[in-house]
Every structure is written in C-alpha cells, then in structure tokens.
Amino acid sequence: MPPLNKPVVVSEETLTEPVAVAGLASAVPKPSAGPAYVVLAGISFSHFLNDTMQSLIASVYPILKDTYALDFTQIGMITLAFQFTASLLQPVVGHYTDKRAQPYSLAIGMASTFFGLLLLSAAHRYLVILVAAALVGLGSAVFHPESARIARLASGGRYGFAQSVFQLGGSFGTSMGPVLAALIVVPFGQGSIAWFSSIAFLAILILWRIGRWYAPQITTKKVAPVHTQPGGPSSRRVAVALLVLVALLFSKQLYVSSLSSYYIFYLIDRFGVSTQAAQIYLFIFLAANAVGAFFGGPLGDRFGRKIVIWISIVGALPFTLALPHAGLAGSAVLSVIIGLIISSTTSSIIVFAQELVPHRFGMISGVFFGVAFGIGGLGAAVLGRLADHTSIEFVYQVCAYLPAIGLLAVFLPKLPQHAR
C-alpha cells in the first residue's frame, strides 16, 4: 500500500479516470458531461437532514444543563462524546470504502442516528446522554466520507461546486437545530426530541435510493497504482501541505465550535436575553455559515482554492477581534459577517486536500471531516473547562485570535491551473 503522502501530480487524467489502489476495486468512474443535479440535490438534502438532527444536541444544552444541573465541563463532554466518535471512525470508514465502496452504508449509518435520537429523548442519566450522543456521532462517521465521494462522483468535473452544494445542505441543517429547539424542544421538553427520529427515517429512505444509483457506478477491475510525474510536489511538500490544511481547519472549526456550543450562554450571560431569543441569534450565525459555505467552492473553482483559503480565514480576523467588545445588535451583525467569511474556506480546504492525494480520496475525506468533528469536540470540552474557571466572555476574547493561524496558508503549494 503506497504511503499517504506519496507525491502526485493532479492532472485531468488523474481526476477523471477511475482511481484505485493496486489490486483493489475502483469506485470512481468517469464523470458525466455535467453535474448530476438530482443526485447532488439528494445527497445535499440528506446532509441537511443529517446535520439538522446533529445540531439538536448543542441546541438542547440549556435544557440539559438546567434539568440535570450540569456544569460547562459536562456540557463540553457531551459535545466530545458526539464529535470524537465521528472523528475517530471517519478515517477508518474512508480507508475501508477506498478499497470496497459500500453503496448502502449511508442508509445503515443513518439508523444509528435514528436510535441515538430516540435514546436521547428518553435519557435520564448523564451516562445515557453521552451514549446517545456517541450513537449520533457514529451515524455521522459513516455518512460523511462516502457521501462526499458521491458528491464528487456526481460533480461532472466541477469539484468545488459539488462540494459546496454538499456543504450547503449540512450548513443549513446545522442552522436549523437552534430554531427547531426553540420552537419544539424548549416548549415541549426533552421527550420531543423523539419526534425528530422521523427525519432520520426520511433520510434513510433517500439514502437507500441514492445507494441504488451509486451501486451500478462501482467498477470491479484492477487498476495500476498512481505514479509520480515530473514536476509534481515532493512527498515532503505534500505532507507539509496536509499538516497546514489541518491547522487551518483547526482555526476555523474551533472558532465555529466556540460559537455553536457556547454562543447561547454568552448572549444570556452578557446581555440577559432569553434562551429562545439566544437560539434565534445562533440560527442567524449558522445560517450565515451556510451561505458562506455554498459560495466558497465555486469561488475556489474560479479563482483558485489557495486565495479563497487566505481570504476566508485571515479575512475574518478583524471581525472576530471586534466581537467580544460589541453590543447585542453589533454582535449579531458581526456574527453574520464572520459566518459568511470563515465558512467559505471549508470546501476549498477539503478539495485542496483531495487533489493533493487523489489516490486516497475516501481516507482523506474521512480524515478532514473527522478532524473537523474531532477538533470541534475536543475544543468544546477545553473551552468549557476554561469557561468554568474564568468566564464565557474570556473564552471569546481568546478565541478571537484563532483566525490568525490562517497565515500558515503561505506554506501551501501552488496547484496546476486546471486542478486549483
């Protein structure tokens, strides 16, 4: 098996021909003349449903905190149980599906989310809450690597666009969690979470149908390994670039995690708003994230992913620095600007990494989606601990400097014009 950081040149042939490890089955056929919009819409909508259910966990934190007298450290551990499960398993799933594509694994994985929601709605002990969160995380681990592969398969060569459409569904799903929590879970209590299992059932049906489309696309022939071509980046450059991309994702995801997990408490603590009002403000931020995530991919296709990464991460720094010092209205405006800018980098980072190591597409997708979840979970736990010992306001003052890590983008290599 070739090493993960094996140097490659990203050429049109590399990106459009079936790619597989020597002796293993290929799961990437030639793209069609244009994007398969129905499939992209289906996988994006499934991402919407998946992340809507996942975002409910963070959105019901105030209810769980009051009901079970949890501190911020315990709240952070719930996020860690959910996101670390996904982080640990996504690269494993991606590595396995690189060798054997599993067209119906998405529907099976969604069943884990289905049972996790039912368990969360009935949980009356802290340990059971952690198990329920971990089950939802397991569903995410199965969903993301293979669904990202399907999005690329249906891209028709417009990889950034397809990744953005895929990310758009997830981002809007994440933004819907606080709204649904404010409208349903807060008035009707923890047991109402079970109602959202119907969303999981709908997602299972859609993903099963997508699996039927995906299954005939899978070829079963042996393909020669990808070879290094003259002028390609060295193994060291590839390894450094991957580490830089992980660091950039760290700065972006940890900041977004700080707002997703604790923004509600920040608004309540500093401005005295109600829980429902705070959830609406969180929705505004997450909706801005969704819009930014959509435009980032096409902009990367048009102008190059490296420039989009530069602008989206470093460009958010002045606004993140201003957020801890703004009033309520100013915080809402700044959160929208930050969400639009900082979220536009996600598609570019993932596609950049995929183009660096195209012969490990599933594993790279799993690693980066997994890193995003893992960083969010670990960061939420650390930030919760910090908030318990200082204050929520201090946490946001510290997190304001995270986008400065985006300066590391200077170490990213320049990709060929057609693959940028």
Image (tube, rainbow, N blue to C red):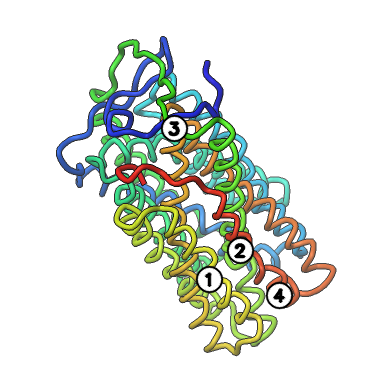
Marks 1 & 4, CB-CB < 8 Å contact: no
Q: Amino acid at mark 2?
A: Tyr
Q: Is residue 124 above or below residue 313?
A: above
Q: Nearer the viewer, mark 3 or mark 2?
A: 3
Q: Amino acid at mark 1?
A: Ala
Q: Is residue 355 above or below residue 14?
A: below
Marks 3 & 2, CB-CB < 8 Å contact: no
Distance from disc 3 to disc 2, alpha carbons, whole Å, reads 34 Å
Q: Is residue 150 above or below residue 393?
A: above
Distance from disc 4 to disc 3, alpha carbons, whole Å, reads 42 Å
Q: Earlier in the sequence, mark 3 or mark 2?
A: 3
Tell me the number on the disc at residue 83.
Answer: none
Q: Which residue is mark 4?
A: 397
Q: Tell me if 338 is positioned left or right of 376 in this view.
A: left
Q: Nearer the viewer, mark 4 or mark 3?
A: 3
Q: Residue 328: image x %, image y %?
A: 57, 88
Numbered disc 2: secondary structure: helix
Numbered disc 4: secondary structure: helix
Q: Tell me if 184 is positioned left or right of 104 in this view.
A: right
Tell me the number on the disc at residue 316.
Answer: 1
Q: Which residue is mark 2?
A: 255
Q: Residue 42: image x %, image y %?
A: 27, 46
Q: Nearer the viewer, mark 3 or mark 1?
A: 3
Q: Residue 221: image x %, image y %?
A: 30, 11
Mark 3: give few (<14), some (14-19) or many (20+) Cα within 10 Å. Answer: some
Q: Earlier in the sequence, mark 4 or mark 3?
A: 3
Q: Which residue is mark 3?
A: 232
Q: Nearer the viewer, mark 2 or mark 1?
A: 1
